[in-house]
Amino acid sequence: MANILNSSLDGAKKTQLMYKCNMSFKQLETYLNLLTERKLIHERVHCGSKELIVYEITEKGHSFLRFYSSLKALLTV
């Protein structure tokens, strides 16, 4: 989850997230649904020559990453 959130800091499409996070499409879908339901990430429709859905981290997602980093640091020997 943290990897997806980090990868969406500047906004990313599903395909970009899939490759950056080394996940299958099905795995990514599962995690995106979970992150969206918990309001850690949101979809933004980018209108141009064709509509694209871009995933962006929310403020709650940023907070999650801060806590995750702190916890990771505590567990590191």
Image (cartoon, rainbow, N blue to C red):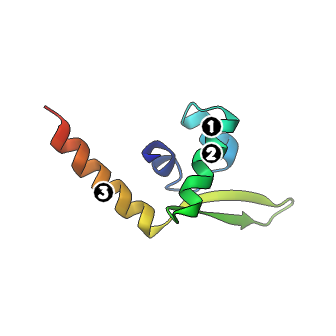
Disc 1: which residue: 27
Front of the two marks 3 and 2: 2
Name the residue type under label 2. Thr
Which residue is more in the foreground, 10 or 55? 55
> Residue at coordinates 69% horizontally, 36% vertically from top-left?
25
Report if the CB atoms under discs 3 and 1 are less than 8 Å apart: no
Q: Position of residue 50 (x, y in %)?
A: 86, 59
Report if the CB atoms under discs 1 and 2 are less than 8 Å apart: yes
Answer with the quarter of the image where residue 51 lies: bottom right
Q: Position of residue 55 (x, y in %)?
A: 62, 57
Q: What is the C-alpha distance between the residues marked 1 and 2?
A: 5 Å
On screen, residue 4 above or below 39 = above
Which residue is more in the foreground, 58 or 12? 58
Q: Position of residue 5 (x, y in %)?
A: 48, 51
Name the residue type under label 3. Arg
User: Where residue 30 is drawn, which disc sits there?
Assistant: 2
Name the residue type under label 1. Gln
Q: What is the C-alpha distance between the residues marked 3 and 2?
A: 23 Å
On screen, residue 9 above or below 47 = above
> Residue at coordinates 45% horizontally, 49% vertically from top-left?
6
Q: Earlier in the sequence, mark 3 or mark 1?
A: 1
Element assignment for label 1: helix
Sort mark 2 into few (<14), some (14-19) or many (20+) by Cα contacts within 10 Å. few
Left or right: where 74 falls relative to 20? left
Disc 3: which residue: 66
